[in-house]
């Protein structure tokens, strides 16, 4: 986790929230959930990830989302 500094104040570490929307389904695109666009490993490991790993997983899910949208077009 990282601390956020605002002037002389120090806030609590930022927490990355799960992108899960409760609609879990794999696709023919691979093991990518069409609800949150995370791959199966990221879904399974989410609770054990550090905040940095969660951020990296969100970046991967964004790339999965973009790739799926391009594939549909």
Image (tube, grey):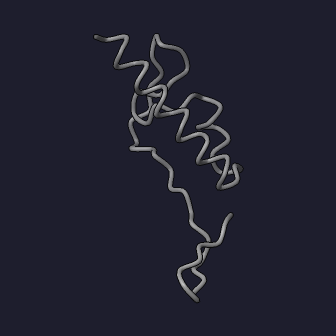
Residue 33 in the image: x percent, y percent?
Answer: 47, 28
The quarter of the picture where the N terminus appears is bottom right
Q: Quadrant of residue 68?
A: top left
Above or below for 66 versus 7: above
Q: Residue at x 53, y 80 (%)?
A: 6
Q: Quadrant of residue 12?
A: bottom right
Above or below for 44 versus 32: below
Above or below for 16 versus 71: below
Residue 5 in the image: x percent, y percent?
Answer: 59, 77
Q: Looking at the image, which residue sits at the far bottom?
A: 8
Q: Looking at the image, which residue sits at the far left?
A: 73
The answer to which of 66 and 26 lies nearer the viewer is 66
The quarter of the picture where the C terminus appears is top left
Residue 2 in the image: x percent, y percent?
Answer: 67, 66
Q: Residue at x 69, y 49 (%)?
A: 49
Q: Residue at x 65, y 31 (%)?
A: 41
Relative placement, left or right, of 2 versus 29 is: right
The answer to which of 36 and 73 lies nearer the viewer is 73
Q: Residue at x 58, y 47 (%)?
A: 55
Residue 61 in the image: x percent, y percent?
Answer: 50, 33
Relative placement, left or right, of 70 versus 45 is: left
């Amino acid at each position: 986790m990282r601390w956020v500094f605002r002037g002389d104040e120090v806030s609590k570490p930022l927490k990355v929230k799960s992108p899960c929307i409760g609609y879990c389904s794999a696709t023919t695109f691979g093991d990518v959930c069409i609800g949150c666009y995370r791959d199966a490993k990221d879904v399974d490991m989410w609770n054990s990830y550090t905040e940095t790993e969660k951020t990296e997983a969100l970046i991967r899910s964004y790339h999965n989302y973009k790739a799926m949208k391009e594939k549909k077009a």
